[in-house]
Amino acid sequence: MLKKYLTNMTYEESIKKLEVLAQQRERGDLPIDALAEKLREAQELIKTCRQQLLEADEQVQNILNPKE
């Protein structure tokens, strides 16, 4: 379910969520019981962002170098 939720997020939403998670971790706002879950969420967010960047790069390359 987490993956489906994350894949529906825009790149900007994913980055913002990562920033919030990082801030919570830095401040110590995450209880130790939630730490593993939030780490998995962060990993999925990073994977989603990476995929979105690759797709955007491919689209830009197709625009700049159209195959005739």
Image (tube, rainbow, N blue to C red):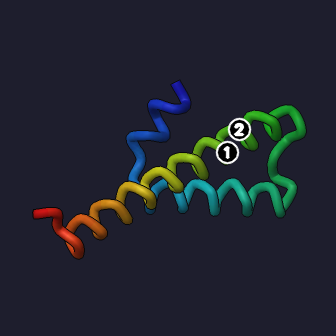
User: Hey, which quadrant is residue 16 in on the image?
Assistant: bottom right
Mark 2 crowd level (few <14, some 14–19, many ≥20, 10 Å Cα): few
Residue 56 - label: none
Give the residue furthest to the front: 68
User: Hey, which quadrant is residue 18 in on the image?
Assistant: bottom right
Quadrant, the C terminus: bottom left
Mark 1 crowd level (few <14, some 14–19, many ≥20, 10 Å Cα): few
Q: Nearer the viewer, residue 36 or 47?
A: 47
Q: Is residue 21 left or right of residue 2?
A: right
Image height of 41 relative to 17, above or below? above
**Residue designated by label 1:** 43
The residue at the point 51 percent across, 54 percent down is: 49
Report if the CB atoms under discs 2 and 1 are less than 8 Å apart.
yes
Q: Position of residue 7 (x, y in %)?
A: 44, 40
- Give the spatial CA distance, label 2 vs label 1: 5 Å
Give the residue furthest to the bottom: 64
Q: Is residue 43 left or right of residue 28?
A: left
Give the residue furthest to the top: 1
Q: Position of residue 5 (x, y in %)?
A: 46, 34
The residue at the point 49 percent across, 40 percent down is: 6
Q: Position of residue 54 (x, y in %)?
A: 44, 58
Q: Secondary structure at mark 2?
A: helix
**Residue designated by label 2:** 40
Q: Nearer the viewer, residue 28 or 18?
A: 18
The residue at the point 58 percent across, 47 percent down is: 47
Q: Nearer the viewer, residue 22 or 54?
A: 54
Image height of 6 relative to 51, above or below? above
The residue at the point 53 percent across, 55 percent down is: 50
> Disc 1 marks which amino acid?
Gln
Q: Position of residue 29 (x, y in %)?
A: 81, 52
> Disc 2 marks which amino acid?
Arg
